Image (cartoon, grey):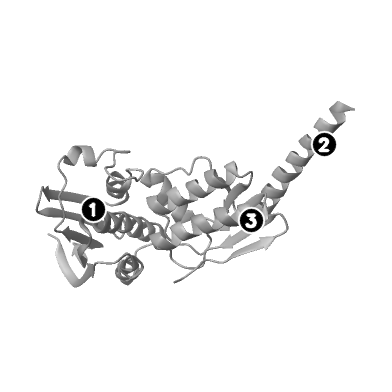
Amino acid sequence: MVITLSKDRMSISREQDLVPFRNRVKEAAVKIGMGIVNQTKLITAASELVRNMFRYAGGGEVLIEVVSKGRESGVRLTFTDKGPGIADLSLAMQDGYSTGKSLGLGLPGAKRLVNEFDLKSTVGQGTTVTILKWKNG
Amino acid sequence: MDKIPILRMGPFLLVTIQVDLYDRLALNLESDLVQKVHQTGARGVLIDISAVSIVDSFMGRILGNIASMTRVLDAETVVVGMQPAVAITLIELGLSLKGVHTALDVERGMALLQEKLDWDTDVADDDGDNIE
């Protein structure tokens, strides 16, 4: 069972929020003693997702949680927006697919960088992405 | 508004990124660099990212763009000082920075740019010799 040890909410509405957000994620990762490579993977994945949220939904909210399961601890991030939603999830998860002018690596790349990845979206209502990176994952 | 300084060193431009980049700042750097290459006629651009802890797909794309844009202006770009964790993350993300020269540190990056410049000059000299 995954237990939440601490919770921190942050709303993202401007591009300048990206840097402080990355710092908050880093703080959570450092707190549980996550190594530098996993920290970098987590923050990079978070950066991809928060950019998506900003670009396609004009912002949203991120929940930063420190969680534990047995002896393992990790950081869980939940990105929630009230944007247009994603019509075709499997297409959105494909490398190189983008409706914007980007490389199309954001979602599939972020998934590769973390241990758990969950994407839920309803067209017209919004998108929620949850990622989890274990300390030793 | 923050700005990343671009230093001129002989025929090269030197950029050291010391802050965490947000997208607007990275885009400004891209256009500033291209302008500066045009103004100064620089033959090489060295970008030091040793203080950068995160390179995501956006930043990776900007680095690729800078390399392509300066190349059509006859200046090579070399990215130096990437942290190991950043290299691991970039490849796993799916970004291999194709078309961007890289070097371990500033010294090797400078040597690489100088080598390319010397090679260009040699080729130009050879052409001159052939005409004789």
Residue drawn at (77%, 35%) of the image: B123
Name the one closer to the observer, B91 or A13.
A13
Q: Residues within 10 Å of mark 1 (few under 14, many from 20)?
A: some
Q: CA distance from mark 1 to mark 2?
A: 53 Å
User: How far separated are the C-alphas under marks 3 and 1?
Assistant: 36 Å
Residue placed most toward the observer, A28 or B80: B80
Q: In this rendering, would A78 be left or right of A32?
A: left
Q: Nearer the viewer, mark 3 or mark 1?
A: 3
Residue B80 seen anywhere in this rendered image of the structure: no
Identify the disc placed on residue B39: 3
Q: Residue furthest front?
A: B39
Q: Name the disc covering residue B125, or none.
A: 2
Q: What amino acid type is highlighted by mark number 2?
A: Asp
Q: Are circles 3 and 2 on residues that touch, CB within 8 Å? A: no
Reading the image, the residue beneath label 1 is A56
Label 3 crowd (10 A; few <14 / some 14-19 / many >=20): few
Q: Residue at position x 39%, y 52% from top?
A: B58
Q: Position of residue A70 (x, y in %)?
A: 18, 62
Q: Position of residue A54 (x, y in %)?
A: 26, 59
**Protein chain holding label 2:** B
Residue at x 64%, y 43% (from the top left corner): B74
Q: Which amino acid, by three-letter code, is at mark 3? A: Gln
Q: Does the CB distance between marks 1 and 2 fall below 8 Å?
A: no
Q: Amino acid at mark 1?
A: Tyr
- Percent x, y of residue A66: 22, 67
Asked whether, in this view, residue B118 is left or right of residue B29, the answer is right
Classify A1 as above or below A93: below
Q: Residue A134: which numbered mark, if any? A: none
SS for callout 3: helix
Give the mark, 3 or 2, whose residue is nearer the N terminus. 3
Label 1 SS: helix
